[in-house]
């Protein structure tokens, strides 16, 4: 009884916070990656966005005090990868931290000789294990514009990836998508990316994908949602397994 009442209350909160038709239309108009969604998909996006706004915390950093205009596009873009899979994929985190622009992080790396190197780096986004997800709003605005860049998708791909236990480019796979198929497909695409880089050729995917299997997966997810037709043309098998993973086929729109 209490569980049913709680679900009803959460549903009411989500409906109250969901984008209005005008708000959603404005977000869709500003981001080409959303414009390929049909009416049914946009309604689902609106519904999920309401649940994200109601169920997740949004905090500002670096002096930013985020308002609805800041949080709403983040929620809409966060709904895109889980459009047909549901918010259970985000069960291990509940917080977004928003900066107005790129933010600095402290780095510490140990080289082959055991020497520790410290420094600072500028980031557009960052995903911490079990959350939060940290985002630059300036980079959110530049995401999904048809250039293969989508910082929200990238960081949330890491959260989806770690549901299997490690952030290693191997997320939990849906029924009908074999692990061997996934490994073979991503390894082949990874090898072609690195071959292009070694030969001095410009690859289709952002070269940052060569950093690690985890980054390869996240960058591939960016391309899947932002330049799906290009990804399908360049890496049809990679597109196929990502389409199965997300239960979406954005290149057909």
Image (tube, helix red, strand yellow):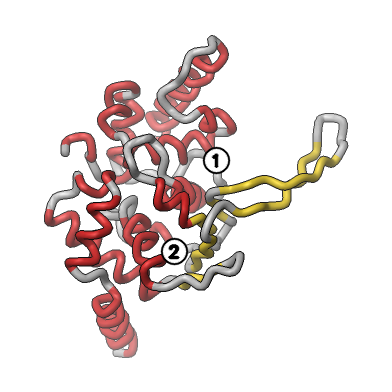
Q: Looking at the picture, tell me which residue is in the foreground, 8 or 253.
A: 253
Q: Looking at the picture, tell me which residue is in the foreground, 4 or 199.
A: 199
Q: Residues within 10 Å of mark 2 (few under 14, many from 20)?
A: few
Q: Secondary structure at mark 1?
A: loop
Q: Is residue 30 left or right of residue 117?
A: left
Q: Looking at the picture, tell me which residue is in the foreground, 113 or 180.
A: 113
The residue furthest top is 199
Which numbered disc, 2 or 1, marks the residue that appears first in the sequence?
2
Give percent across and percent down for residue 48: 28, 64
**In this figure, which residue is indicated by the disc labeled 1?**
168
User: Relative to residue 194, is residue 122 depicted above or below?
Assistant: below
Give percent across and percent down for residue 81: 34, 50
Q: CA distance from mark 2 to mark 1?
A: 18 Å
Total residue callouts: 2
Q: Within the image, what quadrant is residue 26 found in?
A: bottom left
Give percent across and percent down for residue 221: 39, 40
**In this figure, which residue is indicated by the disc labeled 2?**
91
Q: Is residue 183 left or right of residue 81?
A: right
């Amino acid at each position: 009884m209490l569980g049913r009442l709680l679900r009803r209350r959460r549903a009411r909160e989500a409906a109250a916070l969901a984008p209005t038709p005008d708000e959603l239309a404005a977000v869709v108009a500003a981001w080409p990656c959303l414009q390929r969604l049909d009416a049914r998909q946009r309604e689902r996006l609106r519904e999920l966005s309401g649940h994200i706004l109601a169920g997740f915390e949004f905090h500002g950093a670096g002096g930013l005090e985020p308002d609805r205009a800041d949080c709403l596009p983040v929620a809409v873009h966060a709904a895109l990868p889980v459009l047909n899979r549901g918010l259970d994929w985000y069960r291990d985190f509940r917080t977004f931290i928003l900066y107005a622009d790129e933010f600095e992080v402290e780095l510490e790396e140990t080289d082959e000789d055991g020497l520790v190197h410290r420094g600072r780096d500028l980031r557009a986004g960052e995903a911490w294990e079990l959350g939060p997800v940290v985002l630059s709003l300036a980079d959110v605005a530049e995401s999904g514009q048809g250039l293969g860049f989508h910082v929200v998708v990238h960081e949330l791909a890491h959260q989806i990836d770690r549901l299997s236990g490690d952030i290693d480019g191997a997320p939990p796979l849906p029924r009908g998508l074999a692990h061997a198929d996934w490994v073979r497909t991503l390894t082949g695409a990874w090898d072609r990316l690195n071959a292009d880089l070694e030969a001095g050729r410009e690859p289709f995917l952002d070269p940052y994908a060569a950093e690690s299997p985890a980054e390869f997966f996240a960058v591939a997810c960016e391309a899947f949602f932002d330049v799906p037709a290009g990804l399908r043309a360049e890496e049809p098998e990679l597109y196929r397994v990502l389409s199965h993973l997300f239960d979406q086929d954005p290149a057909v729109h």
